[in-house]
Amino acid sequence: MDKLHKIIEKINVNERIDINEGLKLFRQADFLTLASLANRKRFYYHPDKIVTYVVDRNINYTNICASGCRFCAFFVTHDMGQGYIISKQDLFDKIQETLRLGGTQILLQGGMHPHLDLDYYIDLLTYIKENFDIHIHGFSPPEIDFIAKKSSLSIEKTLSILKKAGLSSIPGGGAEILCDEIRQKVSPNKCSSEEWLEVMRQAHMQGMRSSATMMFGHIEKDFHIFEHMDKLRNLQDETHGFTAFIPWTFQPDNTKILVNKKTAVEYLRVLAMSRLFFDNIDNIQASWVTQGDKIAQTALFFGANDMGSTMIEENVVASAGVDFMLSKEEVTRLITKAGFEPCQRDCYYNLL
Amino acid sequence: MDISFIDKRLEGIYSKVLNKSRLSKEDGIYIYETHDLIGLGQVANHVRRSLHGNKAFYIYNQHLNYTNVCKNRCRFCAYARDRKEKGAYTWSIEEIEKRLLERIDEPVNELHIVGGLNEDLSFDYFIDLLKTVKKVRPNATIKAFTSVEIDYLSTLAGLSIEQTIQQLKQAGLEMMPGGGAEILNSRIHKELFPRKIGHERWLEIVKAVHKAGIKTNATMLYGHIETIEERVDHLITLRQLQDETHGFSAFIPLAFHSENTKLAHIPPTTAVDDLKNVAAARLLLDNFDHIKAYWVMIGEKLAQVALSFGADDLDGTIIEERITHMAGAKSAKGLTKEQMEEMITKAGFEPVERDSFYNSINSS
Ligand code: SF4
Ligand code: SF4
């Protein structure tokens, strides 16, 4: 108890807490104590009562994936026959619609398709940039790593080629839990945690910003959550390239991992801890896709200052039995009703 | 406990709570107005914990909605039908027996029985209904009929309220739910449910029920056209009656679901409003033992969070809920006992399975 008090004292004077302190607080502190600490921290970093959101669209260019992660309900293998690679026409229509609806960016992600090579990705980016003035937030580190390996190029080179072709920033997906003992069990064919971090390091060094995510609630233990956050925090000290941290819970339906979904309180506790742990990442994003509108709104009092994206084409999560949908009107209503001022932002968290 | 409020005005409310002095109407209004949701939650949680410690209750119950035919047709109701309308139904006594028998192997401790005001049913039907339930499930408590139904049953029987209650009690009625109060206010009454009994009558009946030694719950339907002041007045009215009768067991804030009603243009309540209603109830209703977070209405995720905002009870392991789901509720249609216990444990509380009167059940 005494020690808990010391940790809270540290937080109150804005000192950094380490893994052990974070873990202790997470394990022992009362739910609303965490909330109140995270809430005050949120106002320390963002004194204005603004909650941001981005209008964008998630475009999955292919659902064929060689990786076969055990937690993934989205992918199909090449021989299953239900695979697709997005057509140019579809891509065009989707982006056009995004712009029409006030969108500012697309989130371009897909599986690790065994037959796609670097030229495909260059062509994809070039095609978009030739036709539209839109921000491309695309290719999570496992995809970049996959493309690099497939093309026998360094990460550095691969990134600079993609950047030249039109890639502006990198989503933080595919991080899951950045501990190899976990990754080996849930996503053995995906890049290692060091490789994931290396992609981000290189991207940040080339001036591309990125988000960071964490998918928890599968087979990890609580200390893995803190190891994960610690690795991100260390890299952030080095590069300052992360714009936001987005924790979300594993959605077990239709996957090969049989666990109960994490409950709302468990999600909010992790969210609050992330606000307390990251003294060097500005924004914490609520995940309405996995939590629904009610908990996403509640999350605004547990450290989150951003509601994420309002448009949905979230195939990866939708395949796992989540079907929350939120329009821009609904997101702004939720923010307003919570006593905050809604504000649309771009990928860099500039207010629009 | 020290609470560092973001909204300093909550300090006054907190010190009143610590001194055990009653909150005023202005305090109540402020509770709804503050944006310091966590500070408010901490005050409500303080009260909740001093009453119930780490316990969070739930009950293994079964709902029986014997008919959806209702002559009242309140504007906010998605459940009721006219007699000949598509989807109208009325269960015969045999059907009710069948439904009870279908789940006879489950450890059901309470039957929650409510329905519409169906002009085809006679008073005898209700007596039969209660007796049948008692016969099939002798050990479960019968919690049945809102004041609205009691009022109607007394006209059916041609008896006074007191006599009606006596007859129902003899047939097996042991407790009453708290529905039908909506917002105790004549403006709302006129606009939303003009054919249903008004608030004076509602209170009169509840008083008579309490006098007859039957406990009831109390509810408030919020999130439609009511003002914050009307909510606070509603809570204070209940508090006054409770001072007089001590017959209320739990209070249940009910979030309005507009889908399929005549008020479909009204957007759903948001989490902040739902949590504030739980906290406001916990703080204003200082003479009520229990505040329920009704997961059917606000979703199981938020109900779990509400346990730290003043609620101590998650209500039932209801398997088949009709009324709210007709109005588009997105919560699961039933939670199992295991799911209920997991929700409570993961929220940091100790699950206690209870009977209708909050005695713990040591299930083995
Ligand atoms: S999570 Fe990504 S990499 Fe893993 S199988 Fe699914 S699509 Fe492939
Ligand atoms: S709320 Fe009750 S009284 Fe009103 S129409 Fe519906 S069932 Fe009938």
Image (tube, rainbow, N blue to C red):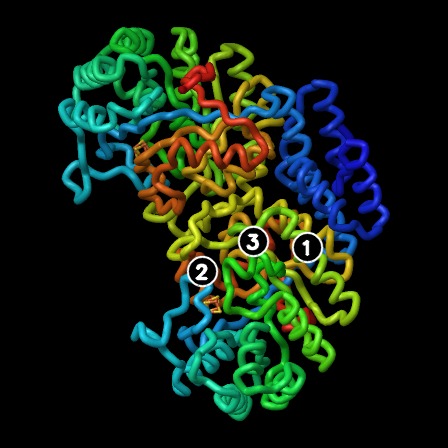
Give the camera-side residue of A2 and B303. A2
- When asked about the image quadrant of residue A350, the answer is bottom right
- Residue A153, image x, y percentages: 60, 86
**In which chain is the residue bearing label 3?**
A
What residue would you read off at disc 1? Answer: A227
Comparing marks 3 and 2, which lies closer to the viewer?
A: 2
B134, above or below A210, in the image: above
Callout 2: chain? A
Residue B30 in sight: no
Which residue is nearer to you in this view: B300 or B238?
B300
Q: Position of residue A74 (x, y in %)?
A: 41, 66
Mark 3 lies on residue = A216
The three-letter code of the residue at mark 3 reads Phe
Q: CA distance from mark 3 to mark 1?
A: 12 Å
- Badge 2 local density, few (<14 within 10 Å), some, or many (20+)? some
The 10 Å Cα crowd at callout 1, few under 14, some 14 to 19, many 20 or more, is: some
Q: Amino acid at mark 1?
A: Glu
Task: In the rendered structure, find residue A70 and report the number of the disc placed on it.
Answer: 2
Tell me the SS state at disc 2. loop
Q: Quadrant of the N terminus of chain A?
A: top right
Q: Residue at x 48, y 35 (%)?
A: B342
N-term mark: 3 or 1: 3
Disc 3 from disc 2: Cα separation? 14 Å
* Element type at mark 1: helix
Q: Report whether B270 appears left or right of B192.
A: right
Judge if badges 3 and 2 mark residues of a common chain.
yes
